[in-house]
């Protein structure tokens, strides 16, 4: 029996958004600009001292970063969670998350890039619908369309419109299914682990930047050989 996707409650103005750093530490100026945007949207934000921890290139130890995610999902006062930054490190905390507690306390969870490891795994383990969107450190420099789209997604039940400009259609047609995916590089790192995603029946979208063509080819070939494209409803490469 298929388990229905777990759709988290949408936000209301004045709700509290908890900020977590599941991967790398971040630039404070960019962070403050993003926080100002969230507050201008009408939300309260919760930031703890642990958020600013540093250990090497991580925002604290693996256990500290996992603890922050677990704590915010369990806290009823926090209605949504947005990641401060991607970078690298989300994959290192997957084994330390309390998936049963997360499933009992579904919340909006937003991030992209390295955070794709969390977005994918939260759906795989909890069937929680997550949000591929800006982190706090990118929000301050985002255009109005991105900000408006984020606000609409977290406050209304409207289905998002995905518009790809200057795209090339390789195989035309129509498809339906859950939209899953994220950062191509990060998703490849999940292959062969207990957190390998299952895209059967889904529309898979992939995003990455700064990679030369042969690396894209290598990662796509790896996913193909791992069976990730078997049974796809559709594929979008952004």
Image (cartoon, grey):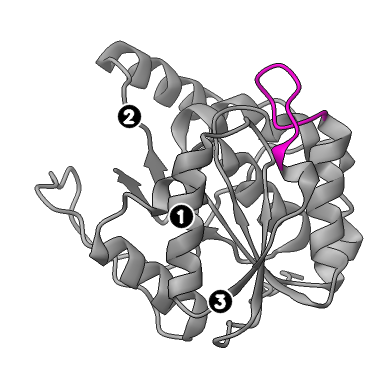
Tell me if mark 1 has few (under 14), some (14-19) or many (20+) residues whose alpha carbon lies within 10 angstroms of its own.
Answer: many
Magenta segment's dominant SS is: loop
Residue denoted by label 1: 34
Name the mark nearer the viewer: 2 or 3.
3
184 or 58: which is nearer to us?
Answer: 58
- Residue 231 in view (yes/no): no
Q: How many marks?
A: 3
Separation (CA) of disc 3 from disc 1: 12 Å
The range drawn in magenta is 52-61
Q: Nearer the viewer, residue 95 or 222?
A: 95
As helix, strand or loop, the secondary structure at mark 2 comes to loop
The answer to whether residue 12 is visible is yes
Measuring 82% from the left and 28% from the top, which residue is drawn there?
61
User: Residue 149: where, in percent of width, then height?
Assistant: 34, 70
Q: As drawn, which residue projects farthest toward the top?
A: 214
Occupied quadrant, residue 43: bottom right
Tell me which residue sits at (79%, 36%) in the image.
93
Q: Relative to 83, is 4 on the left or the right? A: right
The residue located at (79%, 77%) in the rendering is: 77
Residue 136 at what x, y percent from top left? 50, 51
């Amino acid at each position: 029996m298929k388990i229905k996707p777990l759709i988290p409650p949408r936000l209301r103005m004045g709700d509290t958004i908890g900020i977590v750093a599941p991967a790398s530490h971040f630039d404070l100026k960019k962070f403050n600009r993003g926080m100002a945007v969230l507050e201008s949207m009408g939300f309260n934000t919760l930031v703890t001292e642990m958020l600013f921890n540093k250990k090497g290139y991580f925002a604290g130890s693996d256990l500290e970063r996992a603890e922050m995610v677990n704590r915010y999902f369990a806290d009823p006062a926090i209605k949504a969670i947005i990641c401060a930054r991607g970078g690298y490190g989300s994959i290192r905390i997957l084994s330390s998350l309390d998936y049963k507690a997360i499933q009992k306390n579904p919340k909006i969870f937003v991030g992209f890039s390295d955070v794709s490891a969390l977005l994918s795994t939260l759906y795989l383990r909890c069937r929680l619908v997550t949000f591929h969107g800006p982190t706090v450190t990118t929000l301050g420099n985002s255009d109005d369309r991105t900000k408006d789209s984020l606000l609409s997604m977290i406050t209304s039940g409207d289905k998002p419109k995905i518009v790809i400009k200057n795209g090339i259609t390789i195989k035309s047609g129509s498809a339906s299914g859950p939209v899953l995916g994220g950062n191509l590089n990060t998703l490849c790192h999940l292959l062969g682990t207990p957190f390998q995603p299952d895209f059967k029946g889904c529309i898979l979208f992939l995003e990455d930047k700064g990679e030369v063509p042969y690396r894209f080819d290598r990662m796509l070939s790896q996913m193909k050989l791992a069976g990730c494209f078997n049974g796809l409803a559709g594929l979008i490469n952004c």
